[in-house]
Amino acid sequence: MISKTYYKYIWLLDLLLNSDEALSFDIISSEWDLNPAADDTTLALRTFHEYRKGIKEMFGVEIECDRKKNVYYVKNPEVLEENRLAKWLLRKYSIPKDFATFNGMKDRVLLEEIPLGQAFLDNILDAMQRNVELQIDYQRYERGQEEHMQTFHFQPYALKVYNRRWYLLGYKKEKENLLLISLDRVHDLKKLSTHFELPSDFDAKKYFADVVGVFVDKDKQASKVKIRAYGVQAEYLRSTPLHKSQAEVRSKHGEFAEFTYRLCITPELISQLLAMGENVEVLEPKELKEEMKKRINNMFNFYNL
């Protein structure tokens, strides 16, 4: 999970961003006592200044002091608009003020489990920020074999969450190619002093642009995918698109809606469509329709005993 120190940075920054006015240290300290991340400790002034420094390093956000009034405020909140990771961390880990008594409500406020594989996030983020290599002990399943452990040197390019798992994309030096690894399969990870240059043409958004999920096959080209969604599934897709390329091209009120996408046909896409069951029909391409039929027939055979 995210480190307690980072959580405290996020809590402090969230407090100041959502305050209508600058806050004195006494007010910040009293709010700290209600913070679930405080671990029943008081906030010392020296620690507060260390957190200010850490927030600047992590987010690029400066917490300034108005010395005339001896109050603190966020000097450059606009920086967060350009920092997608910072915005995501704030949105995911900030606790609303109404949850100040969260520990007493834990049986009534049910949250989704934190994504798997977060134990090494701090070191990975630091390595990405500094552009230094990692040494990774990685255990994966090989088809037809038992678990296989390997150690390799890795240049971390980008992180992505999918299906409650963290994935790290980077350059594996031993194989001299891009590799995507799941952090829940990492057994050990060390930051090295070896620096690397992130390719000037690398764009994480573009890399994952044509897939649902995380796995990219460069030998596959994106093509038009068309589906028909029935009943409430159409409304669900309108509110939660399967992919950013989604476009609604036809509908009949209360019955169905047709959506098109530009996607690579991958196992993850097929799994998502299968999960919608009888509420979705693949219209094109033919390749995807045939694969769906094959998977559905295989499933039918499991139960047709």
Image (cartoon, rainbow, N blue to C red):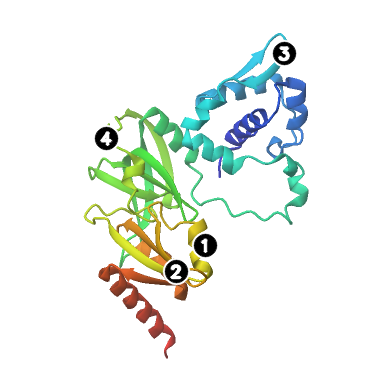
Q: Earlier in the sequence, mark 4 or mark 2?
A: 4
Q: Which of 141 and 45 is in front in this view?
A: 45
Mark 3 nearby-residue class (10 Å; few <14, some 14–19, many ≥20): few
Tag 3: amino acid: Asn
Marks 4 and 2: which is nearer the front? Answer: 2
Compute the Cα span from label 3 to label 4. 46 Å
Q: Do the residues labelled 4 and 2 touch (CB within 8 Å)?
A: no
Check residue 70 in the rendering and tell me which mark sits there, or answer none: 3
Q: What element carries label 2?
A: strand
Q: Can residue 265 be seen in this view?
A: no
Cβ atoms under marks 2 and 3 closer than 8 Å: no
Q: How far apart are marks 1 and 2 (CA)?
A: 9 Å
Dot 1 and dot 2 residues touching (CB under 8 Å): yes
Left or right: where 299 falls relative to 66: left
**Element at badge 1?**
helix
The image's mark for residue 256 is none
Residue sitting farthest toward the front: 253
Q: Name the residue under label 4.
A: 201
Q: Distance between the residues labelled 2 and 3?
A: 59 Å
> Reading the chain from its start, which is encountered first: label 1 or label 2?
2
Question: Which residue position is annotated with label 2?
Answer: 229
Taking 71 as reference, is 192 left or right? Answer: left
Mark toward the viewer: 2 or 3: 2
Within 10 Å of the Cα at label 2, are there few (<14), some (14-19), or many (20+) other Cα atoms?
many
Residue type pointed to by label 1: Tyr
Q: For the residue marked with disc 2, what is the amino acid?
A: Ala
In x, y percent, where is residue 234? 48, 65
Q: Which of 40 and 294 is in front in this view?
A: 294
